[in-house]
Image: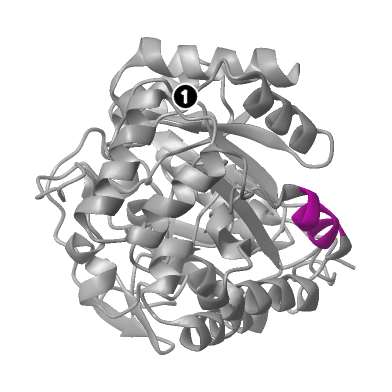
């Protein structure tokens, strides 16, 4: 059953958020009209979204946010509905006490990131600055939950209106961001020297000795376990993607010997079994030419087009970072999350298109929300981390929601201190494998 929505003015913001909520989250066909005659004549499920109701129809109050252009300070007017924190709360004549579509657009467009704020030391938007953190709702995909609760309100008047009854095609979507394919081998000489000096300076004498033994080929590189892990990952039927950092310019001591044939052979080998793409460096996020350089190098290496990518340590200024991806015709991004904080940066677990607020249009860049990274999980400890993931997964309000998790190759290392992480990680993948 399709749905018709009346609004006095159909704007790009309006179309963007309505299609996200109804088509991509609830999987309900929706159409729009600004014609009163067409709305009155329609005999199916319908409602109006306007400052005032037309009559006795199902009506949702429109605050006017979706008819604005540009970026300006918004009075959010927080409230609560159905046990959920909400924005754009009001006391006007309406079936629900807040403008759900304005609130959803505010979250999905990342509107708050365009307003003045203090960035963290990595020039990123900090989780602490978000209204979701202040509302203790960062771990709830509120946009998805609002949509499901609103559908229940609609169903009271239109019982035949429903989402498709289907099983999820696998609830989790893990992927790997590989900054160091090997712990010691196949790195630029200066990087190796710096790594060894750091070990000595911090009195990590075994690490310093281990590095020497690996370089002399007496020991195997600790990260060289791909031949063991690929069968295990394939067994879980999860098919995670691998995003390799392929950058020459060092940042935080990380760089890649991109012309090393053995390193290239590793990446090609992984691409035979799993999707492989590029993890853009910190420098690439700042420099369009560097981004194009890294993208083209990986593309030529694996001999496949690259439509997906993510940024090392997450996206910083989204208007700048995503503009660079669009220039290179990258259509999927996996950077919409926080590196050290678990939660939903855009308050949704369903993929959504990046909306360019500066130019007021929906771009073709699809953002895939990340709820947690390995770094954030390790801050909780092993048991708490996987208990948290299980709890978040069970709280998904709709089968269109996916739990996307960013891990590194450190998670599968068979060192004694890491074995609980490795085992819990493999168990989690196997338990939630696709049917």
Residue drawn at x 63%, y 45% is 38
Q: In the image shown, does 122 or 244 lie closer to the viewer?
A: 244
Q: Is residue 47 above or below residue 219?
A: below
Q: Is residue 82 above or below residue 14?
A: below
Task: Identify the image quadrant of the C terminus.
Answer: bottom right
Residue 431, x across and y down, in percent? 78, 78
Image check: 389 left or right of 190? right
Q: Magenta stretch containing residue 174, yes or no?
A: no
Q: Is residue 75 above or below residue 389?
A: above
Residue 19 shows in this picture: no
Label 1: how many residues lie within 10 Å, few (<14), some (14-19) or many (20+)?
many
Task: Say which quarter of the image contains residue 320.
Answer: top left
Residue drawn at x 51%, y 16% is 328
Q: Magenta stretch containing residue 231, yes or no?
A: yes
Applied colour scheme: one colour
Q: Which residue is mark 1?
A: 325
Q: In the image shown, does 246 or 330 lie closer to the viewer?
A: 246
Residue 107 shows in this picture: yes
Residue drawn at x 57%, y 13% is 296
How many discs appear? 1
Image check: 76 left or right of 176? left
Q: In the image shown, does 386 or 5 lie closer to the viewer?
A: 386
Q: Which residues are magenta?
A: 227-234
Residue drawn at x 20%, y 75% is 134
Task: Say which quarter of the image contains residue 305.
Answer: top right
Residue 95, x across and y down, in percent? 44, 77
Q: In the image shown, does 173 or 14 lie closer to the viewer?
A: 173
Task: Identify the image quadrant of the N terminus.
Answer: bottom right
Provide the secondary structure element on which disc 1 rests: helix
Residue 295, x across and y down, in percent? 54, 19
């Amino acid at each position: 059953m399709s749905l018709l929505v009346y609004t006095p003015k159909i704007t790009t913001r309006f179309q963007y958020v309505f299609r996200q909520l109804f088509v991509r989250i609830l999987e309900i066909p929706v159409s729009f009209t600004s014609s009163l005659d067409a709305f009155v004549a329609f005999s199916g499920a319908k409602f109006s979204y306007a400052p005032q109701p037309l009559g006795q129809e199902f009506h949702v109050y429109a605050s006017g946010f979706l008819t604005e252009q540009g970026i300006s300070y918004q009075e959010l007017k927080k409230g609560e509905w159905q046990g959920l924190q909400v924005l754009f709360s009001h006391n006007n004549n309406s079936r629900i006490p807040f403008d759900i579509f304005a609130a959803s657009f505010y979250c999905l467009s990342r509107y708050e990131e365009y307003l003045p704020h203090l960035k963290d030391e990595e020039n990123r938007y900090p989780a602490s600055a978000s209204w979701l953190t202040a509302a203790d709702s960062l771990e709830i995909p509120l946009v998805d939950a609002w949509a499901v609760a609103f559908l229940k309100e609609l169903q009271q008047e239109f019982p035949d209106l429903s989402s498709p009854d289907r099983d999820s095609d696998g609830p989790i979507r893990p992927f790997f961001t590989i900054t160091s394919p090997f712990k010691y081998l196949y790195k630029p000489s200066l990087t190796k020297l710096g790594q060894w000096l750091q070990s000595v300076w911090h009195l990590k004498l075994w690490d310093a000795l281990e590095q020497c033994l690996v370089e002399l080929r007496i020991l195997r590189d600790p990260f060289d376990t791909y031949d063991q892990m690929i069968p295990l990952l394939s067994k879980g039927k999860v098919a995670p993607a691998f995003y390799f950092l392929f950058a020459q310019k060092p940042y935080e001591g990380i760089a890649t010997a991109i012309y090393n044939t053995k390193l290239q052979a590793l990446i090609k080998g992984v691409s035979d079994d799993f999707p492989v793409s590029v993890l853009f460096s910190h420098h690439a996020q700042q420099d369009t030419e560097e981004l194009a350089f890294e993208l083209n190098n990986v593309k030529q290496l694996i001999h496949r087009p690259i439509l997906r990518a993510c940024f090392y340590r997450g996206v910083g200024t989204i208007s700048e970072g995503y503009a660079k991806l669009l220039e290179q015709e990258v259509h999927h991004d996996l950077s919409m999350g926080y590196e050290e904080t678990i939660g939903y940066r855009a308050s949704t677990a369903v993929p959504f298109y990046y909306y360019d607020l500066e130019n007021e249009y929906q771009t073709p860049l699809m953002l895939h929300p990340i709820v947690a990274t390995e770094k954030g999980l390790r801050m909780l400890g092993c048991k708490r981390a996987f208990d948290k993931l299980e709890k978040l997964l069970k709280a998904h309000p709709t089968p269109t929601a996916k739990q996307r998790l960013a891990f590194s190759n450190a998670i599968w290392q068979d060192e004694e201190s890491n074995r609980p992480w490795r085992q819990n990680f493999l168990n989690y993948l196997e338990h939630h494998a696709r049917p």
